[in-house]
């Protein structure tokens, strides 16, 4: 006797493809969201680092101005007659 091998029906195959496709789309959407979130957090981090760098640069410039002012004041005092 011949053995009858049943193959999956078209409806079952289509449903599996649809489920796989839906799962694949969901994974893609989640990965896309995570990448966008990571990009946003990177921008926020860059903003804070940039602000810290700008503050440090301003502080360094302030110190340079204070040093120049101090040196100028010292020279003026030395130039005054006693």
Image (cartoon, rainbow, N blue to C red):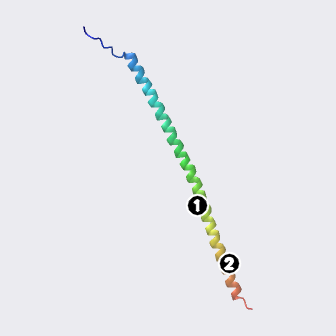
Q: Between disc 1 and disc 2, whose residue precedes?
A: 1
How many dots with numbers? 2
Residue sitting at x 40%, y 24% = 17
Q: Is residue 25 above or below residue 42?
A: above
Farthest residue, direction bottom:
82
- Location of residue 33 in the rendering, given as x and y in whole percent from the top left corner: 52, 38
- x and y percentages locating residue 11 in the rendered image: 40, 16
Residues packed near mark 1 inside 10 Å, few (<14), some (14 to 19) or many (20 plus): few
SS at circle 1: helix
Residue drawn at (61%, 63%) of the image: 56
Direction from residue 80 to residue 55 in the image, left or right: left
Q: Could you give the CA–CA distance between mark 1 and mark 2, rounded to whole angstroms?
A: 25 Å
The residue depicted at 65 percent of the width and 80 percent of the height is 71
Q: Quadrant of residue 53?
A: bottom right
Disc marking residue 53: 1
Residue 15 placement: quadrant: top left
Residue 70: assigned label: 2
Image location of residue 21, percent across then percent down:
43, 27
Residue 14 position (above or below residue 38) = above
């Amino acid at each position: 006797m011949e053995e009858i091998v049943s193959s999956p029906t078209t409806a079952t195959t289509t449903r599996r493809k649809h489920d796989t496709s839906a799962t694949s789309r969901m994974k893609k959407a989640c990965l896309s969201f995570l990448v966008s979130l990571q990009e946003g957090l990177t921008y926020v981090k860059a903003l804070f680092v940039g602000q810290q760098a700008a503050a440090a640069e301003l502080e360094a410039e302030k110190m340079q101005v204070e040093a120049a002012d101090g040196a100028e004041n010292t020279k003026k005092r030395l130039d005054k007659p006693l």
